[in-house]
Amino acid sequence: MTVATATPAFCQGIQYFADSLPGFDEYGQTPAIPQGQTAISPGDNNAVYQTLLAADALRYLTLQITASKASGHPGGFASIADTIAALVMLGYKNIVTEVGHHAPGFYSNVFLDRSLEKMGIETVQQLRDRFRETHGLLGHLSGQIPGLLNPAGPLGQGQHFAMAGAKLNPGTLYPVTIGDGGIGEPYVMSSIAHFNTAFPNVTNFLPVLVWNGYSQEHHSMVSTKTNDEMIEYWGGNGFKEIFLVDAKDFDDANQASDYVDTTLFSFEKRMEFMRVLIDTCDRAAKAALDGHLTVLIVKQLKGAGVHKRGAQAHNLYAGDTVEKDYIVKALKQRALTPQAWELIRNNYVRAAGGPAVEIITTEKERPLPDLGQLPLTEHPVGGEKKVATTAMGELIVHVGQNDPDFLITNADGNAASGINNVNIGLNILHPTPDETYHQQPQGQVYEPLSEDACAGTAASLALYGARTLWCSYESFAINGLPIWQTVTQAMAELRRPTPSTVTLFTAGALEQGRNGWTHQRPEIENYFAAMMRNGNVFPLFPCDANSIQACYEWALGTKNKGVTITASKSPLPIRSTLDQTRQGLEKGAFVLQETPGDKTVVFAVVGDMTLIPSLEAAEQLKAQGIGSKVVSLISPRRLYRPTDTAWETCAEPDGGFLSDDEFNQLFAGDALIGVTGGSSAMLEPVMLRSSCPRDTFAWKRGETASSAGAVMSINGITAEGFVKRAVELLG
């Protein structure tokens, strides 16, 4: 072992180099991917050998960059490094992952093909320095890393990105690594099963099961399955082509476990294993591209080739530094010669036609079809009551009819959310045609009975460049929010414009009295209130059927944002014009009604039904000679001060905030009452900036009741309560 003096420039920062490598003189003299080619020939000895070198390079980099910070996760990726190297060398770079813990391995992968040079990382030293640092390489995958397709954090998400990419880009393969810890989650299989039923011809995604026997801190729950049982498991979930490579079949090191480390094999057996793995990856990729639902299962011990094995390889802790003896030993065992590093770099740059940052499908803005003129219908103020969601439904139909890639997802049914007109206009996506239920195989309404699959599909498609809408009952949406949050944060970091991920949350708690607390969870608004601080999240609260149309019109024109629209599905009065809501979208709110009096009580109202007791309270105050101003909050994010959010750090930054003078024009008075049928956190921007005596009326808890008014009464949201508190505040 020696430290090289003449090395490729990108190798600066590599601590250990080998003096020589077995087989290099025979198989390492010329790149296995010749100049002008994009992939290896699977049966070629040079290709097998050089793919093996690439796998060891990935292991070396993964361990060294994590040990440089005594932090991060090397073990899981180490067990799949051979497969990642094989896929790249075969020319597949649109690689997705479900496992956020594999981040350092994926960073190493796109470092090797020079993608990270786009963010100023040209050497291994810079790779080490910027791992887990601000403006660097986050501990888990994000939206800002050149050459990587998806963010990754919570388990059970990555398959959505692979399926979204596959749907939008026929003929392109999207391998997605799935951890055997994550396969215990129900989301992965159920979401793939529904997607395959809805889109049977979209099979150009390839789940790659990282079957290494361990989860984060113990054996994985599927570690006791036999190979036959694992094959049956995937077959029972609809997979037609199941490829399994078990490293145990090649073990000549007499390892006791069912899960073995291929780096302990003899050179000959390592080559044999890699040869079979490359061939199997090639056949699995072609099967997926040829119209078959396919899975590739690779069984190899967690931590293969790094510092520890099993769950102990998962995470580095304080003290696990590059000076630690067992880390030094592992790095030396994986060390390569400078010539080998140069060879790997040449192959990786040529694979698939260039660095991932230049050729993968998410590295450029996706063109969108023109929607033409939206069919807005402005209902007369004071006229017939209208259902807001139904009014928005007409616009949704127009979008879908003008954009064939548009998809609306809903777990609990559009008819139940007041938008059956969407089912009629766009049809439910189902293999069984049935006019009664407006369903057909070419529909654009996607209805898996899983909020995770609804949110995951819609958000992933938006991240990959398509228009979508996730519709959910407010009470159920919580199960889909983790991936929606992941995507909105990725959009805030993204290096290209993409359509905002838009949601419609209906059947709010106030409408669901007789269903009890199971349907009454408006505390979900806490989630969005916190996310507003990101700077690119805009919860919208239209006040009527005109207002919701203006909100959706605005959302369709935005990029890289998370936009939530919350509205009732009950017929409610028309109180505003389109232009008033457009003003509210720009300024955050607008004055709906102003009543003169000796003193003025301001009602800052979030929502539509909550206007009923607010306007009633205004009338009661008027009878006492007290004036009032009812202000409808359309976009609370606009009401923050610029310093309250991280807006300037966002891609497609939106710095629109209400000035102090404009805020006072809306909210100045002798007393202020904040009203919401959801979380009081949504009123924070107003309460932060108001200087008059003030109080809030908000959701407390769910209870069975006969009407929306009764639910509000249980929570103290009544005109009488408002008036009593207003008089107290006036002193």
Image (cartoon, grey):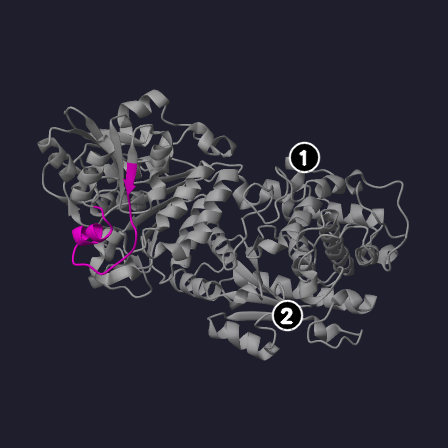
Q: Where is residue 725 in the image (x, y as percent from the top left)?
A: 22, 39
Looking at the image, residue 154 sits to the left or right of residue 303; the answer is: left
Does 482 sit left or right of 179 as displayed? left
Which residues are drawn in magenta? Answer: 695-717
Instruction: Give the total number of marks visible in the rendering.
Output: 2
- Mark 1 or 2, closer to the camera: 2
Q: 581 or 461: which is nearer to us?
A: 581
- Quick one: label 1, few (<14), some, or many (20+) residues within 10 Å? few
Report if residue 418 is visible in the image. Answer: no
Provide residue 193's location: percent of width, then percent of height.
Answer: 43, 66
What is the quadrant of residue 275 in the picture?
A: bottom right
- For marks 1 and 2, the one nearer the N-term is 1
Residue 690 within the segment the image draws in magenta: no
Compared to residue 279, the image places residue 546 above or below, namely: above
Image side of residue 347 versus residue 427, left or right = right
Three-letter code for the amino acid on which mark 1 is drawn: Gly
**Element at label 2:** loop
Residue matched to label 1 = 120
Whether residue 191 is visible here, answered yes or no, is yes
Query: Where's residue 168, x and y in %?
Result: 45, 49
Q: At label 2, which amino acid type do we have?
A: Gly
Q: How far apart are labels 1 and 2 at the CA level?
A: 37 Å
Image position, residue 709 (x, y; %):
17, 50
Mark 2, Cα crowd under 10 Å, few <14 / some 14-19 / many 20+, is many
User: Can residue 716 be found in the magenta stretch?
Assistant: yes
**Secondary element at image label 1:** loop
Q: Mark 2 points at which residue?
A: 213
